[in-house]
């Protein structure tokens, strides 16, 4: 877990009640959204790997069966963290993309920041170079209540306003790419609004709760409560 203050409503992956399985949380102190939601170069320059590796060790001592993170941008560290972990580890919902692209012409992604989500994030998630153009990314506006609350690590959030912002972002993506049928939520704080996106677009909306790797590791068909 990133070190955050913003609220985590039901459906947020950082809220233990959102899960259908028991959850152990470890906060990586001092590593907030601004340190994680960044470019590949800046993330690696932050030397965060030892901090997350220490968190993995703490979770392993608690006997967890699988590990995930609270920020999809950490997919950049997938290979390193997976090698450091003795249990299955899935950093990001972006890792759903390769399997989806095997079946679909293109897949949408709704991210906390389209400007900071680059090709290296998608490549780290397993997307093949010749399919990068088939991942259509829409970001939450930097001046949105959602982005300001999360990236500013604020203690409050206007949930009604955020719900409208998320729905509007999905509709913008649908206008840009009307052929899409599936949307992946990069940000783990977006699943509380998945139903609004489904109602507005008719899309299948997927998140880390849909990770087959986590489901297999935890011997369950349902991760979301």
Image: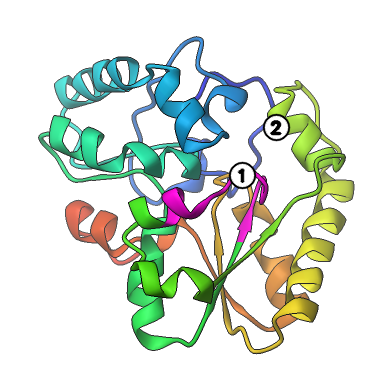
Q: From this view, report whether residue 136 is shown above or below residue 32.
A: below
Image color mode: rainbow
In this view of the protein, can residue 38 be seen by the observer?
yes
**Which quadrant would the N terminus be assigned to in this image?**
top left
Q: Residues within 10 Å of mark 2 (few under 14, many from 20)?
A: many
Q: Looking at the picture, does residue 170 appear above or below residue 116?
A: below
Give the residues drawn in magenta, as a range. 110-122
Q: Residue at x 68, y 84 (%)?
A: 202
Tally of numbered tags: 2
User: Residue 158, located in which quarter of the rendered image?
Assistant: top right
Point out the tag, 1 or 2, that comes first from the N-terminus: 2
The numbered disc on residue 150 is: 2
Residue 223 visible here: no
Q: Residue at x 28, y 64 (%)?
A: 212
Q: Please give left or right for residue 62 compared with residue 212 in the image.
A: left
Please determine whether, in this image, residue 184 is positioned above or below residue 208.
below
- Residue 147 belongs to magenta span: no
Question: Which secondary structure, mark 2?
Answer: helix
Q: Which mark is residue 189?
A: 1
Tag 1's secondary structure? Answer: loop
Q: Which mark is residue 84?
A: none
User: Residue at image x 33%, y 68%?
Assistant: 128
Q: Nearer the viewer, residue 159 or 183?
A: 183
Q: Are marks 1 and 2 in contact (CB under 8 Å)?
A: yes
């Amino acid at each position: 877990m990133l070190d955050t203050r913003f609220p985590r409503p039901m459906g947020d992956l950082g809220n233990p009640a959102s899960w259908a399985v028991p959850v152990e949380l470890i906060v990586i102190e001092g590593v907030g959204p601004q340190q994680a939601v960044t470019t590949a170069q800046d993330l690696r320059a932050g030397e965060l790997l030892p901090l997350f590796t220490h968190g993995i060790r703490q979770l392993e001592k608690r006997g967890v069966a699988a590990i995930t993170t609270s920020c999809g941008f950490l997919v950049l560290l997938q290979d390193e963290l997976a090698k450091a972990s003795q249990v299955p580890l899935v950093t990001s919902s972006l890792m759903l993309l390769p399997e989806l692209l095997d079946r679909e012409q293109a897949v949408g992604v709704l991210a906390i920041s389209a400007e900071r989500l680059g090709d290296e994030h998608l490549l780290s998630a397993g997307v093949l170079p010749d399919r990068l153009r088939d991942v259509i990314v829409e970001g939450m506006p930097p001046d949105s209540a959602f982005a300001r609350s999360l990236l500013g690590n604020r203690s409050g959030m206007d949930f009604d306003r955020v719900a409208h912002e998320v729905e509007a972002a999905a509709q913008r993506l649908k206008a840009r790419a009307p052929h899409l049928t599936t949307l992946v939520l990069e940000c783990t704080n977006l699943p509380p609004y998945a139903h609004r996106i489904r109602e507005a677009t008719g899309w299948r909306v997927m998140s880390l709760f849909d990770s087959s790797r986590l489901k297999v590791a935890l011997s369950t068909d349902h991760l979301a409560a």
